[in-house]
Image (tube, rainbow, N blue to C red):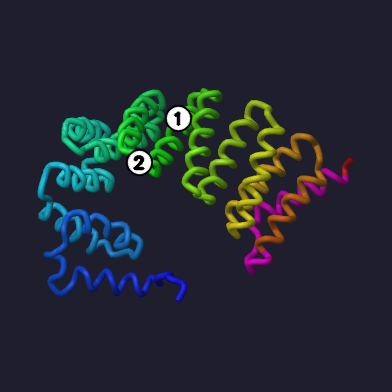
Amino acid sequence: MDGEVTPEQADEVLRALVDGGGMDHLDTALALRLLPLAEELGHEDLVERLLNQADAAASDAIEEGWVQLEHLRRGRDADVDALMALGTDAEAMEGGARLAAAAFHHGALLLHAQEAHNEAHAVLGRSLRHRQSVGDEEGTVYGLAARAACEKALDRVDDAIATETERLGLLERLGDDEGVMEALADLAHVHATIGEVDIASDHLKRSYELAKDLQDLSGQLVAGWGLADLAEIAEDWSTAMLQLSDVVHAFMAAGLPAPEPVRERIQHLTALADQV
């Protein structure tokens, strides 16, 4: 046994938990934890039932707040003001820091989507303070990624580098290799935008090696594409083609066709090299 659960097995477990009267015995925390599974399996009817059960079983204001947040996250009367009000209320509750952090984080994401980047950045700072106050390192990772996105949108490059570096360090401490791989690629992109090509290249090479170790094709594609970008900037067509060819070979080794944009770009680079 490899410990993995098939979608069919997950569906069977979920149905066993909620059918035959089992739904009435779920507490709020368990009902909310089952929501992502029900959504992943496409059971919208169960999502509705789980939300109703979570609401009915809520025993205090904090549990009621988590249920409200799930409603807001799913677009039911979702707006920034409602999320900010929920976060502010949670701040005043004993033990409400995690709820406050989550509400502010989602509110900031809505503000960022509305291109209100300064406001989103400020709200994320408020969320991060709560996450850090309770030692929520995984939540802090998400908060830092969102804050860096705001800083990039505001052209605050130095701040974005500092935030991405903090995120990278936290992921390294957590031993999250996949997260480190992604953070290195993100950090490389920021350095590349200000011409720090050598630093960007070092980060991308490390990201690419991690992606290979993890057998993560998307990670290899992102890092390989970025390395090809840097080579192309230097008009080093052969290195760019080699990097993209490695990506193609990785997909072939996995029995998958390489993405068409990669093949098209190799053809374009070949044409450029032939002109030299």
Q: Quadrant of the N terminus?
A: bottom left
Residue 115 sits in which quadrant?
Answer: top left
* Left or right position of 251 against 231: left
Residue at the spot of label 2: 136
Question: Cα distance, mark 1 to mark 2?
Answer: 21 Å
Determine the main secondary structure of the stretch shown in magenta: helix
Q: Would you say 240 lies left or right of 173 here?
A: right
Front one among 65 and 96: 96
The residue that appears at 15% across and 74% down in the rendered structure is: 20
The residue positioned 72% from the left and 44% from the top of the image is 228
- Which residue is outermost to the bottom? 1
Q: Which region of the structure is painted magenta?
A: 252-274
Vertical comparison of 272 with 25: above or below: above
Q: Secondary structure at mark 1?
A: helix
Q: Secondary structure at mark 2?
A: loop
Q: Quadrant of residue 87?
A: top left
Disc assigned to residue 273: none
Instruction: Please report whichever mark, 1 or 2, sits nearer to the chain's N-terminal start.
Output: 2
